[in-house]
Image (cartoon, helix red, strand yellow):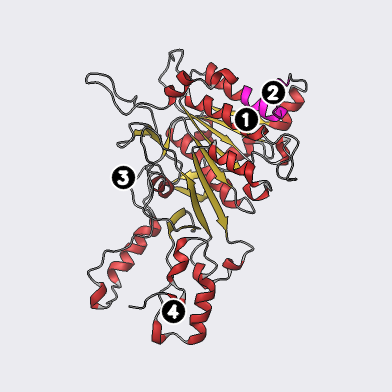
Amino acid sequence: MAALATGGAVRRGVAPSFRRAGEPGLAALPGTRPSLRRGQLLLSSGVPSLDAVLGGGLAVGTLLLIEEDKYGIYSNLLFKYFLAEGIVSGHHLFVASAKEDPADILKELPAPLLDEVNEEETVFKSKESQDYMKIAWRYQNLPKMEASPAASSRFGHYYDVSKTLSPELLQSTKCHHFFLPEEISLHPNINICSNMTSGYIRLLQSIQRIIYQEGFDGSHPQKKQKNILRIGIQNLGSVLWGEDISCTDNPEDIYSLTKFLYVLRSLLRMSLSACIITVPAHLIQNKAIMERVTNLSDTVVGLESFIGSERETNPLYKDYHGLIHIHQIPQLNSLICDVSDTKDLAFRLKRKLFTIERLHLPPDLSDTVSRSSKQDLAESAKLLSSGCGAMAMGKKHLDF
């Protein structure tokens, strides 16, 4: 497998931004669009607001790492959005888990809102136009701040969390399952040729077999139209995969997970595929391991839920369910990466939709606010881990 990580293989998944006149452009694959900045094929993560933050979507041949929240509620939701987008777009799926049967995961995927517009946004805009509130004259000419990160054009679909995908739609999609307890029972003996856990070796062999047999590597021309393989791996690095990095500071094999990611990313680079992985980062005690995992990933997104924390009852965060941190965005075919103009992002789960919005602090009303309210607001602002916490720190900043 180490031969997979060659320089020639890496160039296959990432298309060059320069091409001569007369050469064919990027292949038109279902559920993808070319990036105007980097000349690559992009696919949607299943959350349009997340695509806008990541520069338009996920590049084909890259790895998206999701750092799980404390209870794994919202990370599993993003995991299901990624898979549901693949089914709606007509992509092939490969779902791997050591905790839950992949067949049960597919049954719980949210249903798409194909014929409906975002109802909540439409209602909000209609109310805003009807109930117009007059503001101070000096603020009228200032640019309006949009709640959600904007993109040039919406990419992907919206999904209804309260409904699940129809069985007919699931049957029309080609899905490959990998359930670790089932694989161990079917193939108890395996030749371990590297310093990786047996679960990782089995998983890499399965991914490599699917890529080669289905023709996603591009080395053998496919008889049918080319397609995208979406790979989803759940709870990687947990004890269920045979890892002990979440149990002790000095695990037996400190490089097992990083070796797996190194080989996996080489497989992604040489194929028409994209992968999402959820990792319980809050359980990994050795921070050096997490730094290596981040460096071996392309895109890293962290979720911080308010459940069970002081922010759950904090009035500053009453409209949100957690914070989202963009730790890393890949630099592909460019010297710099697409950096969002907004650093402070929060997410909330509405009645049907999961949305990512800019984090806004309530205004400081100066003389109209009591002294105790100001003190509470200042103490609450100190809890902010991002840069927006410096907006309400009392007399340390100028008052206009």
- Disc 1 residue type? Lys
Q: Is residue 52 magenta?
A: no
Q: Judge by depth and name the residue closer to the eye, 345 or 88.
A: 345
C-alpha span from label 2 to label 1 = 9 Å
Residue 70 spot, x, y in % from top left: 63, 54
| Quadrant the N terminus occupies | top right
C-alpha span from label 1 to label 3 = 38 Å
- Disc 4 residue type? Lys
Residue tagged by mark 1? 259
The disc label shown at residue 194, or none: 2
Q: Nearer the viewer, mark 1 or mark 3?
A: 1
Element carrying mark 3: loop
- The local crowd at label 2, few if under 14, some if 14 to 19, many if 20 or more residues have their Cα within 10 Å, is few
Residue 168 spot, x, y in % from top left: 51, 34
- Disc 3 residue type? Ser
The disc label shown at residue 395, or none: 4
C-alpha span from label 4 to label 1 = 51 Å
In the rendered image of this protein, does residue 337 appear above or below residue 351? above
- The local crowd at label 4, few if under 14, some if 14 to 19, many if 20 or more residues have their Cα within 10 Å, is few
Read off the magenta span. 192-205
Residue tagged by mark 3? 153
